Amino acid sequence: MDEEYTSEYGPRWSDQRVERMLGVLVCTVVGLLLAMIVVVLIKAWPSFAHNGLAWFGPGGNVDDQLNAIFLSGQAGAEYVYTFHAWPLIWSTLLITGGAVFIALFSALFVAVFIVEFAPEWMSNVLQPVVRFLASVPSVIYGLLGVLVLVPFIGNHLVTEPQKASVAGVISLTGYSLLAATTVLTVMIAPLMVSIFSDGLRAVKPGWLEGSLALGVNRWRTTWKIAVRTARPAIVAGTVLAVARAIGEAVMLAMISGSVGFAPNPADGFIFIYEPSRPLAPTIVKNIDQLSSPPANATLFAIAAVLLVSAAFLSLTGWVARRSMRKYGAA
Amino acid sequence: MDASVATPPAAPPPASAPQRPAKGAVEGSATWRLSDRIGLAICWALGLLFCAIAVAITVYLFIQGIKFLKPSMLVTPAAAGFSQTETGGFSDALVGTLILAVMGISLALPTGVAIAVWLVEYGRPTALARITESTIEAIAGIPSIVLALFGTVIFSSTALGFLSRSNEGVVFGRSFFAAAAMLSLVALPLIVASTREGLNSIPPHVREASYTVGKTKAATTRRILLPASRPQVATGAMLGLGRIIGDTAIIVVLLGATQNFAPVEDVPFPLNFLRGAGTTLTNFVYEASPTGNLNQPQKAYAAAFVLLLMVLALNGAVDVVHRRARKVGTWSS
Amino acid sequence: MEFLKSPPPPIRRLELEDPAAARRVAPPAHPANGNGSSAPGGFTGARRSIGAPQFSIRRMEIDDVSVSYSNRDAVKDVSLPVRQGEVLSLIGPSGCGKTTLLRSLNRLTELTSTAKLSGRILLDDVDITLIEPTLLRRRVTMVFQQPNPFPMSVFDNIAYVLREQGSRRQRKKTLEPAVHSALDRAGLFEEVKDNLDHPALKLSGGQQQRLCIARALAAEPEVLLLDEPCSALDPQSTQVIEDLIVKLRDDVAVVIVTHNLQQAYRIADHVAFMYLGDLVEYNSATALFGSPREKRTQEYVSGAFG
Ligand SMILES: Nc1ncnc2c1ncn2[C@@H]1O[C@H](COP(=O)(O)OP(=O)(O)OP(=O)(O)O)[C@@H](O)[C@H]1O
Ligand SMILES: [Mg+2]
């Protein structure tokens, strides 16, 4: 033992040396993240600089704008940067917001169901099923959406008069807000359920017992003690799910309809059948335009918006969790 | 009376720790308000709906997969053709997924474990530790499409030209190397989190015992702490692998998304493939779906089924690791 | 009939229409103040100047109760009365089933899936299996061996009971008096009155236990079950709790589990000695400690004091 210590771990693996090496590695990773933020922002700058705040506003057809930007880069002529991303942002907000709202509500109930109310055998079966569904690649959900849900919506839910009513503006084929939101919900809900139920399971049994011993019924004990104590896990799960939803590119590219169109709630109920395209899928769809400098800047600008949203999101989650920890253990 | 009866038991059982209240306990409805009952009804309804959806998705994918998957698809590469019979299988995609899984995890695992070790065992200066923690958390929240775009910038730089195909000074920037590097970032947070959990679950007295006999921190970590947290490291690796094989955005952007391997010429064997473009199962599913370029739904289902089996195997492995770790037991603190 | 003029009855106190229903208890054989008079068992400590119970009413009846955990008996054929106006103390070596017996009194054993109970337990002559568990647990409240304050503020810990047991949402202001009085009765108010928003989990162990007692008292129970409430307390807080228990005994029936025989001697009116699940001896405190009938009792009682 002593020999090993001096020869193998003495000079070569001294603590200081190891600490320094690990420190360098850690700094590299931190540096990589910073570099990424800086690079993305720098690359995005021309697009933001040319459009100002109008970048985020509405105006014109985004798809035409993207095309013009791309072509201007090809020709070697003066670069065009005009880009008004509102339809993409609006689509992101609608799809992500809808999916997160539905998933949050139902995942909370499902997690409570699994942990507190389902019969023992059922929770034992559901636990691995939830984890499995949470790890299914998003592209598979996309495939199901394209091959099952989209045709179903297109053929059975959208009526001919409805198609006719917006015929001049957009064609309703089933690729729609409804399809995208549904599939996204199905995709992120298991993730939430999995994290929520871990949180609920970690609640100290003594607290539940204490509440039950005071004659508080099962439901209120669950809600007031278990769910309340598990709030940090609920926030963490929600933040992760929202991040996934905002960043989901390929799956949404498959089923959102991939049209730079802003579904208009003023159209009435029919707007959920309208196609659109969120921010992230726009990058995927136009990825072969990276070689054109203005298109490159525009795509990086979209990425910058995603990056900043993600950062803002985890900051929000961090602040929220921090304030909840006040009464938590230790 | 026998005197020995009266002596208290030699080792009194420890005060029983509270246990989770059993589910089946009878409880009448006297104190259940209407809102409580409605809540419980919603709970059951959503729970059962969730079960139904889960069963539907799983069963449907399995049926379609078994129906359309032919063994020949696993060994024939994709080919150009007009009908589904002429276009071959997806062996290149399958191999591509395996290559990326190996490359990605062999980058992410050591890095992740090292970061976790630094965070738990060293963690000085504190400011850097906190920054690192936030960094890891931030990486977990960054959309993979953003990572992919960033990757195009890094790997198109001339300095890294040796990692991909370059043509008259213009670096293509898309290769297995590029994709694997970025995919390892996707897996990193999971590995760090899991390893930290493992290291944190080892009570301090274990470390102290090792330091007392003169072991260095490094030796203690390598000989005692890491072996003890092997289950968690393995779990992290498995979760990371799941994310790596399931990612599509990075593949589409950074692997060139060809239908077959596109090795670089004039380079020795493994490198020519790794520096070239390729495809993976996720990319194949994307391309073979009606919105992709191939539009071969049946093969998409077949490839999705293979992918699903891989995910299932990883999940099973995690379960086995957990169960075995529980059987071996943990430290008493 | 002096006790009828004593402090106002608490909520849900048993109606005493016929004063004769209260069984008069004979005064103890030795002077309550115990100035130097030593009990035969070697107990020299003074019994508190609490005096004999003024009355006692039989509230609960444990009738031939056995509890087993997956076929391993933890409590075997125990029969005991629980009376309001008196303090009943359960003593016995670790693992003899005291906690289990206590938990079965408000059907908490049902929360352990492996536990099986046989026999009858009556509360005011009604079988408790006929009482809805949540309602029963509001009448028969338990304080656990390990303090388990909820992860909320001190105020919310107490208010939780009031809020959840009330039929409608109450505002903080209207809850304040009840919360304060519960904290006061548990002897905690003076220490926490300045910051009731303090996280309960940051209190000391003793304070946490008193908070749990305050929480149980806020529920205005008829029977209070205390499982080693003083094991984590310093002598001073122990005294506060003991005073409290003695004060409470007229309003609620108190059952207390304790490992501290001196304590049992100080505050209990009746003591039940359990051993390996059996009820070995049940008697008045003076009799059990002074002249135990059973050899095992004597050995336990004297053994613990060398
Ligand atoms: N949840 C349980 N499952 C199985 N056995 C249990 C459980 N709780 C208690 N027991 C067993 O029942 C017996 C009585 O336990 P109990 O907790 O009632 O003892 P106790 O007298 O309260 O001990 P202590 O003084 O240490 O608190 C013990 O042998 C214990 O191991
Ligand atoms: Mg006990």
Image (cartoon, coloured by chain):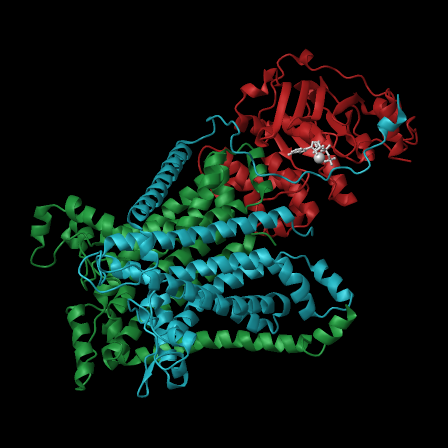
Chain colours: A green, B cyan, C red
Answer whether residue C173 is visible to the viewer in this image.
no
Reply above or below: A27 against A262.
Answer: below
Residue B177 x %, y %: 41, 74
Q: Nearer the viewer, residue A173 or C15?
A: A173
Q: Determine the image quadrant of residue A82.
A: bottom left
Q: Nearer the viewer, residue A36 or C262?
A: A36
Answer whether residue C108 is visible to the viewer in this image.
yes
Residue situated furthest bottom in the rendering: B168
Quadrant of the frame with the C terminus of chain C: top right
Q: Determine the image quadrant of residue A312.
A: bottom left
Residue A94 x %, y %: 26, 56
Q: Residue at x 67, y 49 (%)?
A: C191
Quarter of the rendered structure image containing ligand 2: top right
Residue C183 x %, y %: 63, 41
Residue B27 x %, y %: 50, 27
Q: Nearer the viewer, residue B244 or A250?
A: B244
Q: Is residue C277 left or right of residue A228?
A: right
Reply above or below: C135 against C232.
Answer: above
Q: Is residue B48 left or right of residue C93?
A: left
